[in-house]
Amino acid sequence: MFLVRKATTDDAVTVRNFVMQSGLDVDGLPDIESFLIAESEKKDLLGVIGLETIGASGLLRALVLNSSESTSERLLQFFDQVLLFAKKAKLDELFLTSKEESFFFQVFGFSTISIEEVPKLVRENELFSNQSDQRVIMRKRLN
């Protein structure tokens, strides 16, 4: 059993170190309040993901799981909770970028789109302006 919650300023160092240990670049990460944390009942960190809100859209960033604690079942449960958070936040759609098309995200209803289909406000995020030509963009409509 695990809990998914919004990160607080008290989690900033822990989340940053967790993301850094995964090998992801921590420069340009969204504010700590944009992160969702999955933790065990003993408060052990199981995973994090950034859910940056841009207008009525959400941008998923830096999905990192504790490899020694993660199972496919936990990953599915965690991502289900992330989608519930996005819906409760009244977001219309979610976007993510990836190095390659991901079957995992397709299972959750994400589909590959072109940069032109991304709303201008979201496209202005540095994640898109810096890397969009080298990455796959995926979208899931929530309503």
Image (cartoon, helix red, strand yellow):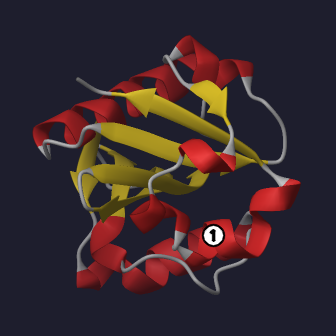
Mark yes or no: residue 38 visible: yes
Query: Measured along the vertical axis of the image, is residue 52 above or below residue 75?
Result: below
Q: Between 81 and 86, which is closer to the camera in this rendering? A: 86
Which quadrant of the rendered structure holds the C terminus?
top left
Q: Describe the element under mark 1 as helix, strand or loop.
A: helix
Asked if residue 67 can be seen in this view, the reply is no
Label 1, residues with CA under 10 Å away: few <14, some 14-19, many ≥20: some
Q: Position of residue 62 (x, y in %)?
A: 59, 59
Q: Nearer the viewer, residue 103 or 95?
A: 95
Looking at the picture, which amino acid does disc 1 mark?
Leu
Give the side of residue 21 with respect to residue 65, left or right: right
The image position of residue 13, as x and y in percent, is 46, 85
Q: Position of residue 136 (x, y in %)?
A: 76, 43
Q: Is residue 41 left or right of residue 115?
A: left
Identity of the residue drawn at 74% across and 75% down = 130
Q: Quadrant of residue 111?
A: top right
Judge whether 64 appears above or below 87 on screen: below
- For disc 1, the marked residue is 127
